[in-house]
Image (cartoon, rainbow, N blue to C red):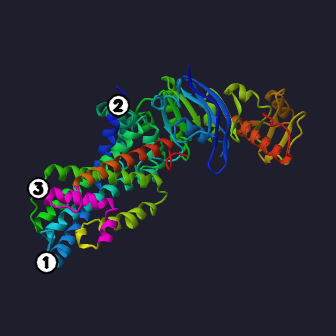
């Protein structure tokens, strides 16, 4: 009985998030599509033609999976951090906190919102990529599972950022100074085999490298890292970040007085 | 059954401020209970703890026998809360504010729609249901928060200054509505700065000051403790100065009115007799201030005087 009621609560958050994404589609869906189109035109088409092949693929084909993953990561993160912090800032987070909805369902509901936006943008960017290059998916289930799980990781990360954030600057710091560098240096635009040994080892400390490469393996069948490692890292992050989110909600850090 | 039972409740904030210093309070099921106190006395902190928005430092809180440490979700399901500050999503439509809240409480969408219509109609917001909530007037926003708090039909409704900033006509219609909700069996705890509101609506009252309960009794008994009432008499003729009325303190307010203090052993007939003997006719009369307000002010003034004196127990009038 209680589970049924909790599922209605979860459904309410997911539906509310869906409506939010659609209501402000010019902020949520359109900008990443335009940005990625520019990436494809400039890096893929204009500069890419001079670069030649990378790992046996046209440069455009090589960067397409990375750009799709980059848009999924930034949009999953951005959706949850802005939605949850917005609720905190506007105090309507209290509507959920005073209700009997369990903390785990509040987290899952917001993660589902991040997943929804991440995947919608991912699909839009994939469609745009198909205008510029051909993508023959080599491993369908790896492609789907990696994008799905990576979106969950960054939705959870966005949730934690929102819990700690005290003002709007705080929700911009992590995406600008942590997420963007890690993504750009995470093998989106190049294979780490191009780097000297030392920097290859340094790059392997970047978890986004594993996610991008696992996704690229799903689509193109090539990767700089073992796929099993990617799943372990993604799974580990999901467990760690979900546990931390639960702990923060339980203790009320940044949410309750 | 007790709708709310609090014992030894303490709250010390991270900055060291001790907002609650050991509160003991019980509210019976079906009661209409006033929780009063000056700004910063601890009312909102106490409500925050009961509704789980504030973590307590020590003490026990039960809502309809659900201990918030043992079964917080059970306690939450019994409570509807209307906070002091507007806290709904101002970019949501009016109907969605209510429907989303119903969803968080696990109410199926079809039932939620019926209840949303019922309460939005009763609070004269049905015509606004498709509008963005930020476009509502201040009074409408307050009514929307009441509709939202009622959509899961709570057994205990906590109203934290529900009529702040609302004009008198709307305020009175809200009183009627809240009174009807109470008559239907919902226990109500009301905090307000409009003491007339508390006096006319509530059967029991607690006054909280400096983190402690200083008065907790039936409203009628509390009001009887009022030793002195001040009345304003409007006179038909002009007066140059305050007349002398034996046994009473009389002050002139203006050329047509007098302020007279009536003690516990005195009565209004004595005043009228003496006014008549002096050839003065009182055309109308009113309390200088609401009785509860007078009591409240004396309590606060008494506290401040004692603080100034630096010692001695606090006197309750």
Residue A144: percent from left, percent from top: 19, 51
Crowding at mark 3 (Cα within 10 Å: few <14, some 14-19, many 20+): some
Q: Along the polypeptide, which appears first: circle 2 or circle 3?
A: 2
Q: Along the polypeptide, which appears first: circle 1 or circle 3?
A: 1
* Left or right: where B28 falls relative to A107: right
Establish if B40 lies above or below B270. Answer: below
Residue B213: percent from left, percent from top: 69, 34
Crowding at mark 2 (Cα within 10 Å: few <14, some 14-19, many 20+): some
Is disc 1 in the same subunit as disc 2? Answer: yes
The Cα atoms of the two marked residues, 1 and 2, are separated by 56 Å
Disc 2 chain ID: A
In the image shown, does B98 or B135 lie closer to the viewer?
B98
Residue most extreme to the bottom: A50
The residue labelled by disc 3 is A138
Residue A202: percent from left, percent from top: 34, 67
The Cα atoms of the two marked residues, 2 and 3, are separated by 42 Å
Highlighted magenta segment, given as a residue range: A197-226
The residue labelled by disc 2 is A5
**The label number, if any, that marks residue A241 in the structure image:** none
In the image shown, does B128 or A246 lie closer to the viewer?
A246
Q: State if disc 3 and disc 1 touch (CB < 8 Å).
A: no
The residue labelled by disc 1 is A49
Q: Residue at x 20, y 76 (%)?
A: A42
Task: Tell me which secondary structure the magenta stretch mostly adopts.
Answer: helix
Is disc 1 in the same subunit as disc 3? Answer: yes
């Amino acid at each position: 009985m209680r589970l049924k009621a909790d599922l209605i609560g979860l459904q309410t958050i997911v539906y509310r998030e869906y409506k939010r994404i659609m209501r402000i589609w010019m902020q949520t869906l359109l900008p990443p599509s335009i940005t990625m189109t520019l990436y494809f035109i400039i890096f893929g088409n204009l500069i890419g033609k001079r670069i030649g092949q990378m790992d046996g693929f046209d440069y455009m084909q090589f960067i397409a999976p990375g750009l799709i993953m980059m848009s999924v990561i930034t949009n999953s993160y951005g959706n949850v951090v802005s939605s949850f912090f917005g609720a905190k800032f506007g105090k309507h987070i209290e509507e959920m906190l005073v209700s009997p909805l369990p903390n785990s369902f509040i987290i899952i509901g917001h993660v589902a919102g991040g997943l929804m936006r991440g995947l919608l943008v991912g699909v839009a960017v994939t469609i745009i990529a198909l205008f510029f290059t051909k993508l023959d998916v080599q491993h369908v289930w790896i492609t789907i599972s990696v994008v799905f799980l990576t979106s969950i990781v960054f939705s959870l990360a966005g949730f934690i950022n929102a819990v700690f954030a005290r003002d709007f600057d705080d929700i911009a710091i992590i995406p600008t100074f942590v997420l963007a560098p890690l993504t750009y240096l995470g093998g989106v635009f190049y294979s780490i085999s191009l780097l000297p040994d030392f920097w290859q080892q340094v790059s392997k400390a970047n978890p986004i490298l594993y996610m991008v490469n696992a996704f690229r393996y799903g689509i193109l069948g090539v990767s700089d890292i073992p796929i099993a490692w990617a799943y372990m890292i993604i799974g580990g992050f999901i467990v760690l970040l979900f546990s931390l989110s639960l702990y923060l909600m339980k203790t009320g850090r940044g949410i309750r007085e | 059954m007790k709708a709310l039972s609090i014992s030894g409740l303490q709250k010390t904030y991270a900055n060291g401020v001790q907002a609650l210093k050991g509160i003991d309070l019980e509210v019976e099921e079906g009661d209409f209970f006033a929780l009063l106190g000056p700004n910063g006395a601890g009312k909102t902190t106490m409500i925050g703890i009961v509704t789980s928005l504030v973590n307590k430092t020590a003490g026990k809180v039960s809502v309809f026998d659900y201990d918030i440490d043992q079964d917080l979700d059970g306690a939450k399901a019994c409570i509807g809360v209307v906070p002091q500050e507007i806290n709904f999503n101002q970019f949501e439509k009016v109907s969605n504010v209510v429907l989303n809240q119903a969803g968080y409480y696990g109410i199926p969408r079809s039932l939620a729609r019926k209840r949303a219509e019922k309460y939005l109609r009763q609070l004269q917001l049905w015509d606004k249901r498709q509008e963005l909530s930020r476009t509502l007037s201040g009074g409408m926003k307050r009514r929307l928060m009441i509709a939202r708090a009622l959509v899961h039909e709570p057994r205990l409704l906590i109203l934290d200054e529900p009529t702040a900033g609302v004009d008198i006509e709307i305020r009175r219609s809200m009183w009627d509505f809240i009174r009807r909700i109470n008559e239907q069996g919902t226990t109500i705890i009301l905090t307000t700065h409009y003491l007339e509101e508390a006096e006319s609506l509530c059967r029991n009252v607690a006054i909280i000051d400096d983190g402690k309960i200083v008065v907790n009794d039936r409203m009628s008994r509390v009001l009887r403790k009022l030793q002195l009432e001040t009345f304003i008499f409007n006179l038909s003729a002009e007066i140059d100065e305050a007349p002398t009325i034996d046994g009473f303190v009389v002050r002139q307010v203006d050329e047509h009115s007098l302020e007279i203090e009536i003690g516990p052993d005195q009565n209004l007939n004595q005043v009228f007799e003496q006014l008549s003997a002096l050839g003065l006719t009182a055309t109308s009369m009113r309390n200088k201030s609401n009785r509860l307000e007078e009591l409240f002010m004396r309590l606060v003034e008494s506290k401040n005087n004692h603080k100034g004196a630096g010692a001695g127990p606090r006197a309750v009038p």
